[in-house]
Image (cartoon, rainbow, N blue to C red):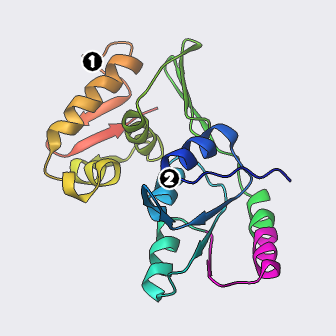
Amino acid sequence: MKIVEAEQLQRGLIEAATRKPDLVILDLGLPDGDGNDFIREVRQWSSMPVIVLSARSDEQDKIDALDAGADDYLTKPFGIGELLARVRVALRRHQSSQPDPIVKFGEVSVDLAARRVLRNEQEIHLTPTEFRLLSLLLNNAGKVLTQRQLLNQVWGPNAVEHSHYLRIYMGHLRQKLETNPTQPSHLLTETGIGYRFMP
């Protein structure tokens, strides 16, 4: 078993995306952010098991982590035997689940787990925000997502009134991924409501 450590949230996201580990053990108290943000980000593109270790023992802290997408929550102090048992259970549960999908539309192929986007076999660079927005749309194919939903999930609750963010970033995605950005076939506007991805 190979173990990789990351001391910061952003580094952890990079390691998780590039190394695609079998399991993540996460401490919620990170120097550059909250562990729940890590979980929410990873859940945009992966179902890898996440076990939270934390000194936070309040019930609400556990609920928040599990609602964000954690598979298990262990309160410090704990025995190494219990941790290893929970790791084995999480890995067994995960082995029976489906692999992370590759979504294809038009000339584009998106590997959600590897965070890679190809268009006509050429890799397309997306910023982290562009990729978050795209993966949210892809994971809800055919469904209209309101501007409020998209703003909240991609930029956070403080951005829900800033619909211009969406217009700008949807424009970027269309320029990079649509054959005809002015008449998109896949990244569609639902006037007055929000946006929809159609494969």
Disc 1 target residue? 183
Q: Secondary structure at mark 1?
A: loop
Quick one: label 1, few (<14), some, or many (20+) residues within 10 Å? few
Rendered residue at 42%/36% (across/down) = 128
Q: Secondary structure at mark 2?
A: helix
Q: In the image, residue 113 lies at what x, y percent?
A: 61, 40
Q: Is residue 190 left or right of residue 107?
A: left
Residues marked 2 and 1 touching at CB (< 8 Å): no
Disc 2 target residue? 9
Which quadrant holds residue 196?
top left
Q: Is residue 174 left or right of residue 25?
A: left
Q: Is residue 143 left or right of residue 195?
A: right
Picture layout, residue 114 above or below residue 33: above
Rendered residue at 74%/60% (across/down) = 94
Q: Is residue 193 left or right of residue 11?
A: left
Amino acid under disc 1: Gln
Taking the image as drawn, is residue 96 in sight? no
Along the viewing direction, whichever of 15 and 117 lies nearer the viewer: 15
Identify the magenta region. 71-89
Amino acid under disc 2: Leu
Q: In the image, residue 169 lies at what x, y percent?
A: 28, 31
Badge 2 or badge 1: first in the primary sequence: 2
Taking the image as drawn, is residue 163 in sight? yes
Along the viewing direction, whichever of 106 and 132 lies nearer the viewer: 132
Rendered residue at 62%/46% (across/down) = 16
Check if residue 86 falls in the magenta segment.
yes
Rendered residue at 27%/18% (across/down) = 183
Quick one: label 2, few (<14), some, or many (20+) residues within 10 Å? many
Q: In the image, residue 64 lies at what x, y percent?
A: 44, 74
Check if residue 107 falls in the magenta segment.
no
Picture layout, residue 148 above or below residue 101: below
